[in-house]
Amino acid sequence: MKPAGIVGIILIIVGIIGFAYGGLGWNTEKKDAQLGPIEIKHQERHGINFPPILSGLCVVGGIVLVVVGSRQT
């Protein structure tokens, strides 16, 4: 498969995830202190918010790249 097609498929997936979840998010756990066997930890939430317009642009751009990638010979 051509590189344009692969990038197009990735953009389509990112756009669908943006529509479904409103963005990408993940949690990280950080250790604050350790006093013997006792550990004090907290979780931080990180993420990227995708507006619906950006998600739509990703899907449309991905479709265009897949079509262009399949037409190249």
Image (spheres, helix red, strand yellow):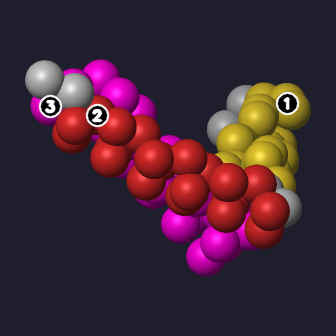
Mark 2 burial class by Cα count in 10 Å: few <14, some 14-19, many 20+: some
Which callout, 3 or 2, points to the residue nearer the camera?
2
User: In whole angstroms, how far apart are the C-alphas of marks 3 and 2?
Assistant: 8 Å
Nearest to the observer: residue 20 or residue 60: 60
Residue bounds of the magenta highlight: 1-24
User: In whole angstroms, how far apart are the C-alphas of marks 2 and 1?
Assistant: 52 Å
Q: Is mark 3 in CB contact (under 8 Å) with mark 2?
A: yes
- The residue shown at (86%, 32%) is 32
The answer to whether residue 28 is seen in the rendering is yes
- The residue shown at (61%, 76%) is 20
Residue at mark 2:
69
Judge whether 29 appears above or below 7 on screen. below
Residue at mark 3:
1
Residue at mark 1:
33
Q: Is mark 1 in CB contact (under 8 Å) with mark 3?
A: no
Q: Is residue 12 magenta?
A: yes
Magenta stretch prevailing secondary structure: helix
Image quadrant where one finds the N terminus: top left
**Which numbered dot is residue 61?**
none
Q: Which residue type does callout 3 highlight?
A: Met
**N-term mark: 2 or 1:** 1
* Whole-percent x, y for residue 54 in the image: 76, 54
Nearest to the observer: residue 35 or residue 31: 31
Q: Which residue type does callout 2 highlight?
A: Gly
Image quadrant where one finds the C terminus: top left
